[in-house]
Amino acid sequence: MTKKQKAKIIMEELEKLYPEVPIPLDHYDPFTLLVAVALSAQTTDKKVNQITPELFKRADTAKAMANMEVDEIKEYIKEIGLSNQKAKNLKRMSELLLERHNGEVPRTFEELEALPGVGHKTASVVMSQAFGVPAFPVDTHIHRLMTKWGLTNGKSVVQTEADAKALFPKESWNKLHLQIIYYGREHSPARGKRDTDYILAAAPTKGDKR
């Protein structure tokens, strides 16, 4: 079985399991999504969703966030990891959105990645989920499962993203990356639960060809 053939089977199986995939982070516009994704680094989406309602009541625009002091922002997000740096990033990010983009979230990877606390993965999530631009954000679930399924060598998330984009149709990227995340959480966790990887049964990794 070639990697392309395996990728097709994986897509078909994931579509059966997750025909609908809600965005895991609660938000209601590009700015609140950008903030939520920036906060999600090294913590869980569940935890971010617990703290953002109060934060967004206080500041759900770049202008409101920029007017907050760093210590005040930190007070709202103190329960998640790296809260000191994230608070600084959120304030400066909001200031730059006002200075460079009239308070709006930009719609290019380059402009997004120029903001504090916004790396390529965060930019990819915003581009795909807020603006519908094809992107394939690679989180730990996707990196691990793509390696496990024999679709990438697992050496880096950069390589995993490139391999995913080469194997899966562009029009599938925005939905598929969410399907893989949901699958990883439910059926193939890194630790804790028993691994029940149905995809491996449907698309065996042995005998792969390029």
Image (cartoon, rainbow, N blue to C red):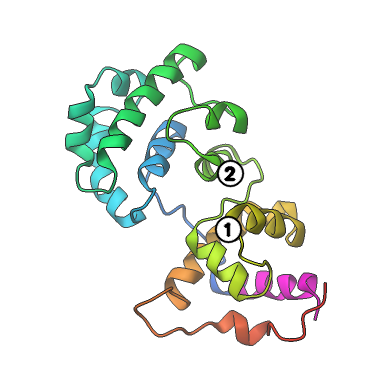
Q: Main secondary structure of the magenta part?
A: helix
Label 2: few (<14), some (14–19) or many (≥20) C-alpha neighbours in 10 Å: some
Assign a secondary structure to mark 1: helix
Quadrant position of residue 94: top left
Q: Position of residue 45 (x, y in %)?
A: 36, 54
Instruction: Name the quadrant of the C terminus.
Output: bottom right
Q: Position of residue 67 (x, y in %)?
A: 27, 17
- Viewed as shown, does residue 77 lie left or right of 31? left
**Residue span colored magenta:** 1-15
Mark 1 touches mark 2? (CB < 8 Å):
yes
Residue at 50% from the left image edge and 42% from the top image edge: 122
Residue that label 1 marks = 177
Kind of residue sitting beneath label 1:
His
Residue at 73% from the left image edge and 60% from the top image edge: 168
Quadrant position of residue 133: top right
The numbered disc on residue 27 is none
- Is 26 above or below relative to 167? above
- Viewed as shown, does residue 35 lie left or right of 118? left
